[in-house]
Amino acid sequence: MDLKIDLTRTKLSKEQLKGYSPDTENALEKLWSGKEDFTGWVKLPMQIDPDELEKLLNTAMIIQDQCDELIVIGIGGSYLGARAAIHALVGFDEVYGTGIASSRYPSVKFAGNTMSAVYLKKLLKDIQTKEVSVCVISKSGTTIEPSIAFAVLKEAMINKYGKEKACKRIYAITDAKEGILREEAEREGYVTFKVPDDIGGRYSVLTPVGLLPMAAAGIDIKSMLAGAEAMATSTAWDFDAADYAAARYALYQSGKAIEIVEYYEPQLEFFAEWLKQLFGESEGKDGKGLYPDALRFSSDLHSMGQFLQQGHQIFFETVLNVEKPSKDIIIPDSAGELLAGKSMNQINKAAMEGVMAAHEAAGIPMVRIDIPELNAFYFGQMIYFFETTCAITSYLMGVNPFNQPGVEQYKQEMKQKLMAL
Ligand code: PA5
């Protein structure tokens, strides 16, 4: 395994972690048995259909030729994985979207993940001024935010291109058979891909849900799948990988209520968001679960650093360290003796090590995960590693990692309010 997991600062002994081995082994067996609902993602990296992969790559090339901007409509599991990957591997625009356009690849913007009219207006302007394609992603086809965004953006696409040409610029990823989006896609002749029945939203990043937007943005999805496969088949599940899942559970049992994911490269911002959904929706039920949070360092040290160092210690920290960032800068002499001549990456590492030493002295349990570099291969490893970890810890907690009954409740309440408008 190329990711490195360091649990020494959790202060859990090897013997303590070993005590959980029978349970983590059972959890892994259950995941690989093929008998549990919604575990299609477990073997997916090894079993991806070559024809589907070919169709994905061909469609990505058509999108690249067709547009300057791809608008990806979706929410939750139908959006965060693609956004995380594109933000980390392609680049990002801090305010309105992700994905830097180049002569070869379109920029990628995301819609249908808020109900902000301000943001949608901006995308409507993009449709007037740029060549645009739209990829609408919804497993159910009925989620309210993407449905609104799709209705508004589709109308603008039809106004600009005419119906026939607009339909050739719309790509739909949805349930194989059911739902209004599937019906519409077949009626209007959109190019479609299916969300597999046995994979839920937050575990779907390595299906067309994540892979089509990523491939359109120029990410090497074959390499990403190879990274996921390397992680799936790694012998590390016999020790340190499974131990992280056990450590999360042990810390939860010892009274820690929050896991804070901390990162020192802003490229990981949406990976942390994806992680929050994965952990939060999988574990948070039946009155159980670790509350997942994320902090961007060093920015958040200047807002949350005080609390972390001396506040109510209901949390532990998981530090994501990118060993070799893709760029570096040497600090000029004018920055003063302490900093001049050193590289930005050296200083960032010193910050990380300094913070970890200070937090260790304060008694905060910490996990450190080293990522060799941010590329598609290691990103595939990261996705698979955290999905499996999350499922194992959920089983240790005694909750079903693959449902989200609580999400439905607010949707029903909102529907009542809408009917009263
Ligand atoms: O993980 C999940 O299941 C959810 O976050 C869904 O992905 C999200 O609610 C969007 O659902 P849908 O794809 O049906 O629009």
Image: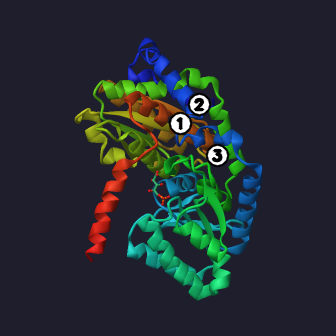
Measured as percent of width and height from the top left, residue 232 is found at 63, 33
Residue 285: quadrant of the picture:
top left
Q: Which residue, given by chain and number where applicable, does mark 3 sit on?
A: 375
Of residues 161 and 367, the one nearer the viewer is 161
Give residue 36's mark.
1
**Amino acid marked by disc 3:** Asn
Q: Quadrant of the C terminus?
A: bottom left
Give residue 33's mark.
2
Q: Residues within 10 Å of mark 2 (few under 14, many from 20)?
A: few
Measured as percent of width and height from the top left, residue 85 is found at 57, 52
Residue 131: quadrant of the picture:
bottom right
Dot 2 falls on a residue whose secondary structure is loop
Q: Residue at x 74, y 59 (%)?
A: 55
Q: Is mark 2 within 8 Å of ligand 1?
A: no
Mark 1 / mark 3, whichever is N-terminal: 1
- Mark yes or no: residue 253 visible: yes
Labels 2 and 1 touching (C-beta < 8 A): yes
- Mark yes or no: residue 227 visible: no
